[in-house]
Amino acid sequence: MRPRALDSALRGFIAHHGIPNAGNSLGSYLYALRNSPLPVPSPLAEAQRLYFQNQIVDVRNTYMHQAGTAPLNDNELAILVADMETCLTDVFNL
């Protein structure tokens, strides 16, 4: 999965469903999904938003925005990708 693929997928999901969104970042998309006033799709639970913020957004931002940082091994990278896939699955099942 490309680093920005999750961003693009969530942005498209939000736009498709007409969910109000005030930002242009992965974190803002998670907040928009949590704060959705629409009955369909249902809002993202705060526990999910917080988990994805901690396990994906914060980790990915470290790798993308701090010089000299990268996953230490294949397992660390696999965990990040698995969490990204879980995020997409959870969102698409709202």
Image: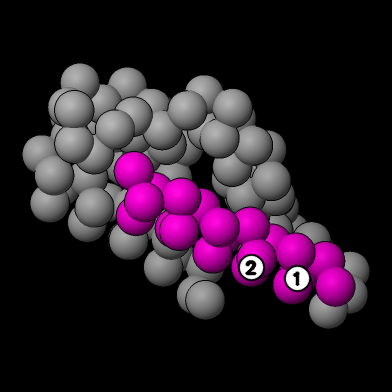
Q: Magenta stretch: residue 28 in it? A: no
Query: How packed is label 2: few (under 14 Cα within 10 Å), some, or many (20 or more)?
Result: some
SS of the residue at dot 2? helix
Q: Is residue 23 above or below residue 24?
A: above
- For image coordinates 44% across by 58% down, the residue present is 88
Q: Give me the residue at 44% from left, 45% from top.
A: 26
Range covered by the magenta-colored residues: 75-94
Query: What numbered label is drawn on residue 81?
Result: 2
Question: Residue farthest to the right?
Answer: 72
Q: Tell whether 33 sits left or right of 74.
A: left
Quadrant assignment, res 23: top left
User: What residue did someone put label 1 on?
Assistant: 77
Residue at the spot x=41%, y=33% of the render?
A: 44
**x%, y% of residue 29?**
36, 39
Q: Are marks 1 and 2 in contact (CB under 8 Å)?
A: yes
* Whole-percent x, y for residue 33 in the image: 34, 34
Q: Quadrant of the C terminus?
A: top left
Q: Residue at image x 29%, y 33%?
A: 42
Query: For residue 52, which numbered disc appears in the image?
Result: none
Determine whether, in the image, residue 38 is placed left or right of residue 52. Answer: left
